[in-house]
Image (cartoon, helix red, strand yellow):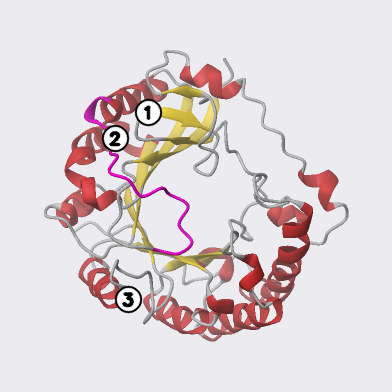
Amino acid sequence: MEKMNYLSPWIQTTNRCNLRCSYCFVKKEDVDMDTEAYEAMASKFLSFLDKGEVEFIKLRIAGGEPTIVFNKWKEPIGRFLDEAGERGGAEVLTNLVKIPEGFSDYAINHRNFGINVSLDSLTMSKPFRNGESSSYHVLDNIDRLKDYKDIFIMTVLTENGKHLPGLAKYVTENKFRWEVQLNKFHEKDIDKDKVIKNLRSVVNTFTKQGLSLRDYFLFNFCDFRTTRICDAGQKMFYINPAGDIYNCQMQEHGKPLTNVYNNDLLGRLQENHVKRPYVAMCGNCSIKDFCHGDCPVNNGPARREYFCDIMKGFFSYAAKNVLKFGMGNKQKPTEAKNH
């Protein structure tokens, strides 16, 4: 079996959530991953590392809202982190509207545990069930954690990106790493010219703060540090609450690829051939080395024609920032703090 340099599974801890985001693709239901599935994953992934079959494994702890079921996954994920050491890590993808008891100490005590906070606006982010914004709660909780742990901000672009300039000021002042994702399921609501204008405002803010986009910013899964393509279904994959494995979290339909209890899980991933028609579709596009055609699940001709202009408008303008700061940017993100 060929050695794999990394694995990065998306672990759907629960389908429950305390918010009601309009763009969420997760079916809201009271379904949680059980203890047996967590234990099977921790043991199997540690075995891959111990046998030298995989060099590094990073777990993405997701949902729904994973902090709701923190008590269910904290011990098996903690065991994985402790035994994997430098060979592994985990990142929780959370709305952070509430910090569960023991979460702060858990995050601080596990140096290889990251916090990715979903924040779409400083004032009108992700509504509660009653329609009120969660922004105040999220920003307050970020302040409670940021002196002890590095925070990564993830934003889904809404309302033509009008919230991006304010978020850019916030993340650059705090020197947070930041990822912005296009709202791929509501493209008809987007004015391309306004989106590009707001994205260019982001570039200007980073430049004024003396921060390189190369080190601090990702846009739509693409950045200036890598020329990666989507590894969904092989190195990156989705594990649903039942322990079934699919190519990615947007492809949970039909027969699963395998499950976490399969003794040949790694072999099944390696023999999985995912169709990736990137280069043929992109031709001589000037930015194809960054995006490689974007998401293979959601890149039909109409969608691609719509979003390609936004991608080109951003990357052509952002290149100036990267060239300005080059490879020697002195204000790189610090290592995760451990007090």
Badge 3 is on which residue? 133
Location of residue 78 with respect to 273 vertically, above or below = below
What amino acid does circle 1 point to?
Gly
What secondary structure do most residues of the magenta stretch adopt? loop
Badge 2 is on which residue? 33
Residue at 61% from the left image edge and 77% from the top image edge: 199
- Of the numbered discs 1 and 3, the one sitting upstream in the chain is 3
User: CB of mark 2 within 8 Å of CB of mark 1?
Assistant: yes
Image position of 43 (left or right of 187)? left
**Distance between the Cα atoms at labels 1 and 3?**
33 Å
Q: Quadrant of residue 83?
A: top left
Q: Nearer the viewer, residue 19 or 121?
A: 19
Asked if residue 24 lies in the magenta stretch, the reply is: yes
What amino acid does circle 2 point to?
Met
Q: Quadrant of residue 224?
A: bottom right
Give the class, few, some or many, for how many residues have Cα within 10 Å of label 3's Cα (few <14, many ≥20).
some
Q: Which residues are magenta?
A: 21-36
